[in-house]
Amino acid sequence: MLQFKHASFASQGARPYQEDAAGVWPGDGPFAPKGAPALPDGVGLVAILADGMGGHTGGSLASTTLCSVFLESFAVGEGEEPQRLEASLMAANDAIRHKVEANPSLSGMGATLVGTVFGRDGLRWISVGDSPMYLYRQGELVQLNEDHSLAPVIDRLVEQGKMSAEEARQDPRRHYLRSAVTGEDIELVDTPERPLALAAGDVVLISSDGIHTLEPPSIGRLIADHHAEGPEAIAKAIIRAVDGAGEPHQDNTTVIAVTVMAAG
Amino acid sequence: MTAQNDGAGGGRRMSGSLREALEAAARSGPAQFEMASSHDERTPPALPMPMTPSAGAAAQSGSNVSVPSATQAAIEARGGSLPDSEETPQTRVVRAPRGAGQQSATVARTQLVRGKAPVKRGDFHQDPVVGWLVVVGGEGLGAFRPIFEGNNTIGRSSNQRIPLDFGDETISSEEQAYLRYDSVDRRFLLVPNLAKTNIVAVNDRKPTGAVELAPMDVITMGRTLLAFVPFCGSDFDWGEFTEMQG
């Protein structure tokens, strides 16, 4: 099986609180499953990232809850990876619902979620919301998961000539979510049936939407420049570039970089 | 917040056999559920360009040729196209920005827009069909085109969601009209595109605004006559199917 190395860094940006959360398993991070269970056969790494919403306590509670419940549920789950991913998403969604039921002042809290499994079959994921995940391979960067914000809908209006590119770029509705994990029904879930085959040298980057301060070509260049130094250097360079852009309303940004190496 | 599921209520008159067939399909999983296979005849849309940081970078790195490019790998994993392309196979639910126009411009960066009744993606192998247009006069007589949930563009070009590409050149190539089906109010609306020279008629009336369609209404576009045959409506909507699946 291919080997996977990972690193994660976060920046609060210009926001008063951090509503992103990220976790990996195996690892000794804050969301690692309790009791150090063994990885399922064929699985090398499980990584999750959530971007919370709901302000103050709600947003960060939602994203941290999703990360811990998702990883915990995946670790004790049964069945093949796709079933585990879906069951973990549902368990995480239920956990949000229970928290809101127990404390109605949290009503409206929720988060995006990107849950990934790196293993023998390649990369599988389950994604809700607008947190992008990219594949970098041999100089090329491609977003893998669907964007459940209104941005693709608005961009389509531009293609159809119903809105100018400038209006579309400025439109505040770009950041509205069409789907999120809120404890209620989840409206859109992106989880392809087939795994993505990975190759040595690949970099997978999972991020919250704060990364949109950087254009995709810049992200690709940063990965290319730090590729040889490993995932810490890649993740750090991206966070540094986002902070360096000096956006006055810079959103929280969190990245998980996973590099893929040949076995042995 | 979950009041969207209403409307499935009373007065279901669906015939037992269809209801049973749907329930059987729901029990045995979506793999056995294939409809409107004529859809496959259509030319797939062109894929969007990938985000390439530098055109020559892939060539420069020059390594393993047997590994597909990032774009190819993404398309392969997604079963045919990049995410958020116009007809991504995974996107079984096409959602319009409903109600977004009423939202305040001063918003927190991340917030949720509530849309229609939840239909889980992954349950369908392609856009679920909600009705058909059958050519009852003119070029293509006897053929049909599926109608999908949401907004359907109608025109002569093959990139239209309802392509009337049977050879009638008097139909506008793009967006001569829109046919909309909304799973919340379960109505079909034909909306003429008044910016186009070519006129659309419904049962020989020439509407200047949206018209609600009734079964077997006849739509005239150019020299082509189309009969409207609904599948979804007050008796059935795909939202019920996914509810059956639980």
Image (spheres, helix red, strand yellow):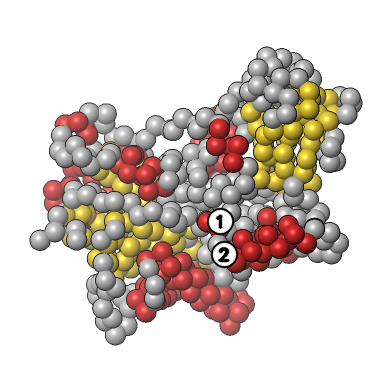
Chain designation of label 2: B
Residue bearing the label numbered 1: B32
Given residues A166 and A69, the one toward you in this image is: A69
Label 2 SS: helix
Image coords of residue A248 (percent x, y)? 42, 48
Relative side of B51 to A229, left or right: right
Q: Residue at x 52, y 56 (%)?
A: B31
Labelled pair 1, 2 in contact (Cβ < 8 Å): yes
Where is residue A10? Give x, y as percent. Answer: 32, 60
At x 22%, y 34%, the residue is B58
Q: Residue at coordinates 13% horizontally, 48% vertically from top-left?
A: A228
Give the amino acid type for the residue marked by disc 2 in the picture.
Ser
Residue at the spot of label 2: B28
The mark tally for this picture is 2
On the question of residue B96 being in view, the answer is no
Locate residue B205 relative to residue A252 in the image: left or right.
right
Of residues B50 and B227, which is closer to you in this image? B227
Residue B205 visible, this angle: yes
